[in-house]
Image (cartoon, rainbow, N blue to C red):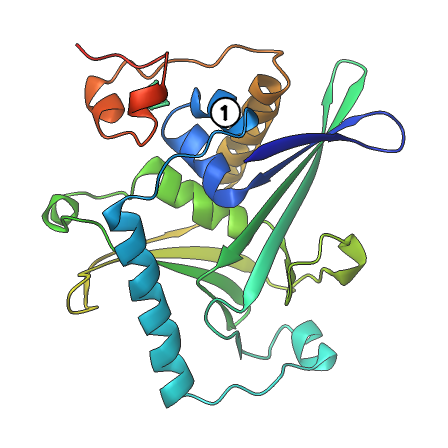
Amino acid sequence: MIQIQELSDGSPLIISTVSNFCDCMGFCEFKILHFLEGISSPQTTIMVEGVKAHEQEEEYEREHFDFVPITQEELENITQDLEFVREGIFTRRLEMLKFGNQEVGLLLCGRADKIRRTRGTLIVEESKYPEKTEKFLTKTEPYDDQKLQTLLYLNSRFSEDTSLNRNDWVDIPHEAKVWIINIKDKQTGETVKSFRGTQTKETKEVLHQKLSRFALVALRKADPEHHGNVRKCRSCRFLDDCEYKITC
Ligand code: SF4
């Protein structure tokens, strides 16, 4: 769901989950209109299996590793390596955008699979459990929505709970940012392909452009652009009810 609220000065505040944002800006911009109307599509078998596989990863970690709470000093000490409990960190990205004279707030809320800091580098690592892993073997880059998700996490503030109060969010000091996307076999849990990248000036700029574009379409200041890809529509969860779909 994407919601638009009003800030105390009358400016709009767009609130979305990271997954909805990535679905819209990494797959199809028309989904913004569906999410704004509160239309949610049914969960697919792949999604249900993915949730189950993530829960198994969490359980494995709980059984095999002991995590002690991280102190404020450890957090602030950039030379201190840190590892947060799997699925234990919520991400909050608040962007204030300006279109002409109008200020617009955009808040993206997510939950990262795994976050750690190693030798001053902030690392976000996500696991993906696709239906077919073979198609990833020849790919050199992950899908746009997958990369967008990790970039967003890397450029967020963090919270140990679901609080939307910015006083509860913290920064993790670091000198560089790295994203890792592991494509895993859902039967065995083994990683069959790993994509990895460092945040650059260019990727940061791409993220900013996507955030601005998302806000413009959500506020109906710009029309969504169609990807023109029949195969995308055929695989889309909104297919049955989408008036914007293309079928040939
Ligand atoms: S059916 Fe096609 S146009 Fe409609 S939301 Fe899905 S991908 Fe976009």
Q: Is mark 1 within 8 Å of ligand 1?
A: no
Q: Amino acid at mark 1?
A: Ile
Residue at 70% in and 58% down: 163
Left or right: 65 as drawn, with respect to 193: right
Q: Where's residue 234, x and y in %?
A: 21, 24
Q: Does residue 139 sit above or below 133 in this rendering? A: above
Residue 8, located in which quarter of the rendered image? Answer: top right
Instruction: Give the residue pinned by disc 1.
Output: 32
The spot of residue 211 in percent (x, y) is 57, 31
Q: Name the residue at 22% across, 50% down.
A: 130
Image quarter where the N terminus lies is: top right
Quarter location, residue 12:
top right
Outermost residue to the right: 9
Side of 248 relative to 224 (left or right): left
Of residues 25 and 12, the one drawn nearer to the viewer in this rendering: 12
- Give the camera-side residue of 126 and 176: 126
User: Is residue 179 something that shows in the picture?
Assistant: yes
Percent x, y of residue 244: 36, 12
